[in-house]
Image (cartoon, rainbow, N blue to C red):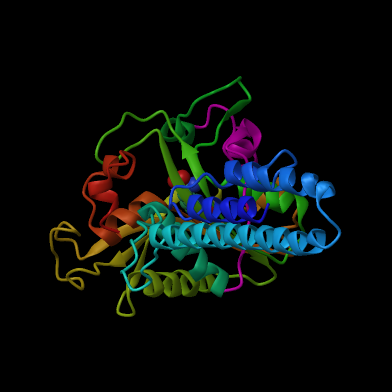
Amino acid sequence: MRETLEKIKAEALEALSAPDANIEELRIKYLGKKGELTAVLRGMGKLSAEERPVIGQLANEVRAEIEAKIEAFQSAAKERELDAKLAAEKLDVTIPGEKIRAGHFHPLSLVQRQLEDIFLGMGYSIVEGPEVELDYYNFQALNIPKDHPARDTQDTFYITENILLRSQTSPVQARVMEKTQPPIKIISPGRVYRSDAVDATHSPLFHQLEGLVIDKNITMGDLKGTLEMFAKRMFGEQTEIRFRPHHFPFTEPSAEVDVSCFVCGGKGCRLCKGEGWIEVLGAGMVHPNVLRNCGINPEVYSGFAFGLGIERIAMLKYHIDDMRLLYENDVRFLGQF
Ligand code: DAH
C-alpha cells in the first residue's frame, strides 16, 4: 500500500506540474470520491492495527501534498491571468487627452445674449410673447386698425383672419401693459415673420428685440440716455447716436435712431456707405392711444419703446454682408464666431 501511495503521489505531482494541466480533471482523478487516493483509503480496513495509523498518516500527507500542489497551480494561474489583464488594460495617464470639439453659440444668439446683458444691467426684465399672435395685439392694440396703410410694410402669414405670425415683437408691449400697472421696464427678444422674399437683407423669419419703459414722468430724454448707453455698450465707448424724425403708429413722437459708424468713426466708409451714420432701430414715446388700449392712464403715465432687428445688429457688428449666411448652418461660416 505504501508503494501505491508513493506512486499516486509521484504521478499526481508530475501531472500537476505540466503547465497546461487540466486541474479539475486531475483533482477528480486523484482526490475525487471515486479517485485513486480514496480507493486506497477504502482498502485500509484490510490493514493490520499497527499498519493502519502509519498508512493513514501517509495517505493524509499525500492528500495534503496533492491539495497544496493544486492550490499552488491555481494561484499561479490566477496571477498569470491578473498579469495578462493588467498588461492589456495598461493606462498611460501621461498621454495627452483627446480634445472634445465643443460647439458654441450662433452669432445671432451671441448678439441676443449681449443685448440681454446690456438691458438686464440697466434693470430690465426679459419677457417672451407668442409667435402665433392675434391680429389684435400685433396691430390693433398698437394703434394700427384694420386697413391702416402701415400694415402694408408688415405683411405676414395669416392663420385665420384674426390669427397671424407676429410681424414684430411690439405686441409683447401690449400684452405686458394689459396685465401690469407701471412701473414697467422690459425687453422682449424673439422671432418675427414677414412675407418677404429672401435676399441679402430680407428673410421671412428674423429676430427683433423690443424694449418698453412705462412710469410717471418718463421723457424723451430718458429714451435718448437709454439708447446712448446701449449704443456705447454694443458698439464701443466712442459711439454717438442721432435721432431722425419718423412715424410709427404706436409712438408719438417717433424716431429712427442711427449710431455713428464704429468702423470709420463718422468720416464715411463702406460699412456706413459714406454716411458716417448707421440706422439701427426705431423708437419713440408710447402713443396715448396704445396706453389707453392697454388700460394705462396716459394722464398719469408715460413711457418709451424701441425695437431693433437682431440680424441687423449682428451683421453690423460682425461685418456680415449677406443675411442668408446666418441661416445656412455652414460650419465654415459659423466656426468664425
Ligand atoms: N416694431 C417696429 C418694426 O418692426 C420697430 C419699433 C419701432 C418698435 C418703434 C418700437 C418702436 O417699440 O417704438 O419696425
Residue at 40% from the left image edge and 33% from the top image edge: 204
Left or right: residue 109 versus residue 101 is right
Measured from the top left, where is residue 60 in percent x and y?
73, 61
Residue 260 sits in which quadrant?
Answer: bottom left
Segment colored magenta: 122-148
Asked if residue 63 can be seen in this view, the reply is yes
Nearest to the observer: residue 323 or residue 83: 83
Measured from the top left, where is residue 86 in percent x and y?
44, 63
Nearest to the observer: residue 40 or residue 253: 40
Measured from the top left, where is residue 212 in percent x and y?
59, 59
- State whether residue 31 is above or below residue 68: above
Asked whether residue 131 is drawn in magenta, I would say yes
Asked if residue 186 can be seen in this view, the reply is no
Asked whether residue 168 is drawn in magenta, I would say no
Residue at 39% from the left image edge and 65% from the top image edge: 91
Residue at 31% from the left image edge and 74% from the top image edge: 239
Left or right: residue 256 versus residue 7 is left
- State whether residue 265 is above or below residue 169: below
